[in-house]
Amino acid sequence: MRVAHESEPFMTQLNFLPQFPLDASPLALFGLLLLAGVIGGELARRVLRLPRIVGYVLVGLALGASGLNWLDGKLLKEAWIFVDIALGLILFELGRRLDFAWLGREPWLAATAVLESALSFAFVFLALLYFGVEPLYAAVAASIAIATAPAVVLVAAQEIRAEGQVTERALNLTAMNSVIAFVASTMLLA
């Protein structure tokens, strides 16, 4: 064990303490972002009497490129694993709710999902072509546009405690749209 001499500066004797400013690890930053989102969601629900998802979006806007720009590309690159985990959990929950037996009994639900996806693709694709976007880019964007935001649908259903046949149909359509969008975009990117 080394003993500090009187000739050494006081600060070098304290080199075992953390240096300020602290280096922000991606895990710590992601935790702070989650905390900010939860606080924003609760404020939206309790103060503004709006769904929590509105607070999540407002916090994202405030911290993103439109606001303080704390969520830059570097941070998002470092946090990709957390984003993948969150998306995986959302899609897992959505897949858990997909009822193939119900689709067998209700073939019109599957037909509605296919028609809805085809029309969404066609309208977005044609609109992007009209504005001069290259066909391949327009097709990829249109295939992504097929997907209904599963996180929004799940959070909204949970927030208002929606249950019943209409909610289950909406969740099944959302799941099928997401699957169709994934398959279509994967085929186009191949």
Image (tube, grey):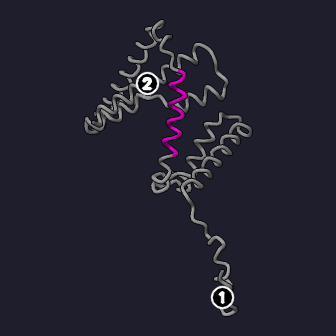
Residue farthest along the bottom direction in this orientation: 7
Please state the horizontal and vertical placement of residue 162, each as a whole percent of the image: 64, 21
Please state the horizontal and vertical placement of residue 46, each as a whole percent of the image: 74, 38
Q: Is residue 130 visible?
A: no
Amino acid tagged 1: Pro
Q: Which residue is label 2 attached to?
A: 177
- Residue at 45 percent across and 54 percent down: it is 73
Residue farthest along the left direction in this orientation: 135
Which segment is the magenta one? Answer: 82-97
Please state the horizontal and vertical placement of residue 9, each as a whole percent of the image: 66, 88
Q: Tell me: 35 left or right of 82.
A: right
Q: Residues within 10 Å of mark 1 (few under 14, many from 20)?
A: few
Please say if 16 is above or below 38: below
Question: Does 91 appear in magenta?
Answer: yes
Q: Tell me the distance, in whole angstroms, between the alpha carbons under discs 1 and 2.
A: 66 Å
- Give the camera-side residue of 29 and 156: 29
Chief secondary structure of the magenta portion: helix
Q: Residues within 10 Å of mark 2 (few under 14, many from 20)?
A: many
Label 1 or label 2, whichever lies nearer to me, is 1
Question: Does 110 appear in magenta?
Answer: no
Amino acid tagged 2: Asn
Q: Which residue is label 1 attached to?
A: 9
- Pick whichever of labels 1 and 2 is earlier in the sequence: 1
